[in-house]
């Protein structure tokens, strides 16, 4: 048995001993994805974990995802295998800056993407995902929306509403890397492929896409589609699951592989250490949890 196989066996044994549930984001390393009890989008994973009786959640993702799991399951122990796995997008918005913007627009509703810290969620009126942001904003009665932290998602939502959207100037550095030239080259190389891109991409990339979808949306679309070839405009980790679930179809990265260094920090050894030592537990102030819960619950009224 190889070292990796031994490590995997020990992780599975430790997980069972702790009665832990392993949540793995779609952008994680393939060997981590293959161990997940649930693999998916961040909020989708946290909501699933909340319905289980597992007393421990181990979240292989980035910090805001583990925080969301804790917000929805405050009674459970939530571990993040790599404490340094942050999210540059989530870090682009801060509570003080958001409060100043709210003061400048007192009638605006604060809509915050789930890719944000617990403290920013707590300062918001309602949370959204990349899959439901358009639907939620359309249904809100407010005429003015402060949208944090992703400006590209905000611009995408603006296409579908006459409400005034005031975007926070944050962005995902991974999706920001996609270029028009890459789209044109990919189209030329794969003329029969369907181009799927994430709404965190820049507007000029959105303009050229066949479909704009969240990662879970891409997975559902690829499975249901009669097309046999797809160009994928998101972090390269999703290609593993797309190929695994659709072995009869072809998937190509939009241009060079785009990698989130934070998502790739978590290795099997980190997961093993987290389970052995119960390390990197997520703690959030109970008042923050309550306020953030309110913002997340508010979203459920519209979806």
Image (cartoon, rainbow, N blue to C red):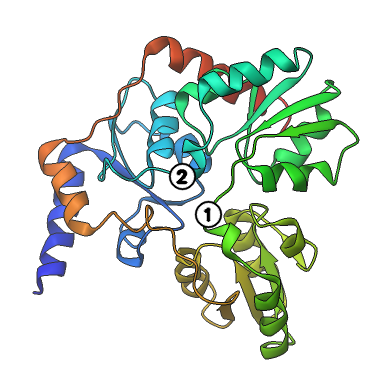
Tag 2 residue: 88
Residue 173: mark: 1
Where's the C terminus, which quadrant?
top right
> Tag 2, which secondary structure?
helix
* Mark 1 → mark 2, Cα distance in angstroms: 8 Å
Residue 34 appears at what percent x and percent y? 34, 63
Q: Is residue 287 above or below residue 158?
A: above
Residue 283 appears at what percent x and percent y? 30, 23
Q: Is residue 53 above or below residue 7?
A: above
Residue displayed at 58% across by 54% down: 216
Q: Is residue 115 above or below residue 184?
A: above
Quarter where residue 297 is shown = top right
Evaluate if marks 1 and 2 touch, with contact meaning CB atoms under 8 Å apart: yes
Instruction: Let me know if residue 238 appears in the view.
Output: yes
Residue displayed at 18% across by 61% down: 8
Q: Is residue 33 above or below residue 119?
A: below
> Tag 1, which secondary structure?
loop
The 10 Å Cα crowd at callout 1, few under 14, some 14 to 19, many 20 or more, is some
The 10 Å Cα crowd at callout 2, few under 14, some 14 to 19, many 20 or more, is some
Where's the N terminus, which quadrant?
bottom left
In this rendering, position of residue 53 left or right of residue 207 = left
State the residue lying farthest toward the top.
287
Quarter where residue 167 is shown = top right
Residue closer to the observer: 269 or 300: 269
Residue 289 appears at what percent x and percent y? 44, 17
Of the numbered discs 1 and 2, the one sitting upstream in the chain is 2
């Amino acid at each position: 048995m190889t070292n990796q196989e031994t490590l995997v066996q020990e992780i599975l044994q430790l997980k069972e001993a702790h009665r832990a549930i392993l949540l793995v984001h779609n952008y994680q390393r393939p060997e981590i994805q293959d161990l997940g009890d649930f693999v998916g989008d961040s909020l989708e994973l946290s909501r699933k974990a909340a319905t289980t009786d597992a007393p421990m959640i181990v979240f292989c993702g980035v910090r805001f995802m583990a925080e969301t799991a804790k917000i929805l399951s405050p009674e459970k122990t939530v571990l993040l295998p790599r404490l340094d796995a942050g999210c540059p997008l989530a870090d682009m918005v801060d509570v003080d800056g958001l409060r100043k913007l709210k003061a400048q627009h007192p009638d605006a509703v604060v809509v915050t993407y789930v890719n944000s810290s617990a403290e920013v969620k707590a300062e918001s009126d309602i949370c959204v995902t990349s899959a439901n942001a358009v639907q939620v904003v359309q249904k809100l009665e407010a005429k003015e929306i402060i949208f944090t932290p992703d400006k590209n998602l905000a611009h995408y939502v603006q296409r579908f509403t006459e409400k005034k959207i005031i975007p926070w100037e944050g962005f995902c550095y991974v999706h920001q890397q996609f270029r028009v030239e890459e789209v044109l080259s990919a189209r030329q190389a794969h003329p029969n492929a369907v181009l799927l891109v994430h709404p965190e991409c820049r507007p000029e990339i959105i303009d050229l896409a066949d479909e704009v979808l969240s990662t879970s949306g891409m997975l559902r679309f690829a499975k249901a589609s009669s097309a046999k070839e797809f160009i994928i405009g998101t972090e390269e980790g999703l290609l593993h699951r797309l190929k695994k679930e659709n072995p009869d179809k072809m998937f190509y990265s939009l241009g060079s592989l785009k990698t989130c260094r934070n998502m790739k920090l978590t290795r099997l050894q980190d997961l093993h250490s987290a389970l052995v030592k119960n390390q990197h537990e997520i703690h959030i102030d109970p008042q923050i949890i309550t306020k953030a819960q309110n913002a997340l619950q508010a979203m459920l009224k519209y979806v």
